[in-house]
Image: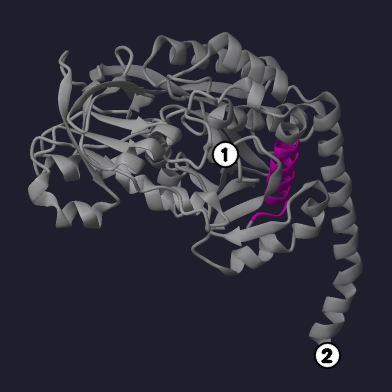
Amino acid sequence: MKRLIAVIALLPLLAIAQDRDSVMIKKFSDEILRNGTAYDLLYQLTKQVGGRLAGSPQFAKAELWGKATLEHIGPDQVIMQECMLPHWVRGGQDKAVITELDKKKASRALDVLALGNSMGSEGKTITADVLMVADFDELERRKDEVKDKIVYYNYGFNPTNLMPFVSYGETGMYRRSGPSRAAKYGAVAVMIRSLTESSANDPHTGAMAYTEGITKIPAVAVGPRDADYLWSIKTGFKVSLKTNGQFLPDTIGHNVIAVLKGSEFPDEIITIGGHLDSWDVNEGAHDDGAGIVHTIEVLRAMKALGYKPKHTIHFVLFANEENGLRGGSKYAEQAKANNEKHIFALESDEGGFTPRGFGFSFKDKSKLVKVQNWLPLLRPYGTDRMIDGGGGADIGPLAAAFGTPMCGLIPDPQRYFDLHHARSDVFENVNKRELLLGAVNMAGLIYLVDQYGL
């Protein structure tokens, strides 16, 4: 009975707190939707800096842009956290041409992009018969046919998956390990169907990795329409292929970190961030310019409203997510060396589309129930789900090192892979209203975690 009386007595206090939180989140929303600078900052990052592959001069320019932008907002501190970056370069235009079809000369160019981290053809043009396989199982069945061939994998997105990120997870292994699996049987090069359901013919690049001890062969992604054509003819053709990718020596880069010091728990850190690097073939507007300006906008709104966080908040522009994860790894490594206490990490790295919710990774699943109680406070701004499973590549090392609860913003995913790692990921394909709403929801969630912890 005493417990019941105590609970009843708490109900008015809970209602007051919820009303206070609702008012504060509305203030964040009004500030961001009226005065938000995220769209203008995205224009600067994409049009004035451009594509920012880790290690490139453009990435160094992006770091300076990030530092100046954060300092202008006026956090307590801006830190340039040094880390070594891989320096892969494309080295020129990637080319693939069908030169023979049914034993007759042909000349049909294919739209291709070399996969990131792949090695080029060493100045030569590779001409060979193409072995078309649907998947790894077919490769294994036909391994005796692979030697001296260009292997083409046609494994594409499963259109029945309602969440495209599921399809991306299923197909990603063909980009990552497909070249070495074919090279093991003597293939001279690899082509893959681009990881997309887009109806455009833009090829989609992305990182791959060679297996130690296996010959490093060139690897390209083929535009979706050209991939359909190749699959339709199936056999009896040769392709001439030339790529120029290579690694230069590692170079110095930085995570750019803005700090707001906590008023009550300064030694407990909340991280919010996105990755500053992009691929070289586009402007990286959705991947991950959107996450960068989301992060900056939350900081700007907190400063504009005079919000004093209870916990210390790090706003991190991570270096090198796309082809090495050096930035996220360095951030976690330094946090461990400093014996820091990281209580929560949020990343935006799924584009600037309309926000739908958040995905959480908790070791203690009871914490998911706690954050789901906040759903009514965020639902007016687009958050309709708080689900188990989520985070981000850059904050993954932090979770591994500390067991830090991590979370990822979930925008509407249906168009993301039309643009992901393709030349079409440009500023013009980002909607201002949708972009700002993402920042609204992130600000609301960070506010709640800051107020109540986990």
> Circle 2 — which element?
loop
Most distant residue in the bottom direction: 1
Q: Is residue 371 left or right of residue 327?
A: right
Q: Which residues are magenta?
A: 437-453
For the residue marked with disc 2, what is the amino acid? Met
Q: Looking at the picture, does residue 426 appear above or below residue 237?
A: above
* Disc marking residue 416: 1
Tag 1 secondary structure: helix
Callout 1 crowding tier (Cα within 10 Å): few <14, some 14–19, many ≥20: many
Q: How many marks?
A: 2
* Residue bearing mark 2: 1
- Magenta stretch: includes residue 156: no
The image shows residue 407 at horizontal and vertical percentages of: 57, 50
Which residue corresponds to the image point at 9% horizontal and 44% vertical from the top-left?
Answer: 185
Image position of 370 with respect to 314: above or below: below
Left/right of residue 126 with respect to residue 26 in the rendered view: left
* Mark 2 or mark 1, earlier in chain: 2
- Tell me the crowding category of disc 2: few under 14, some 14 to 19, or many 20 or more residues within 10 angstroms, Cα based: few
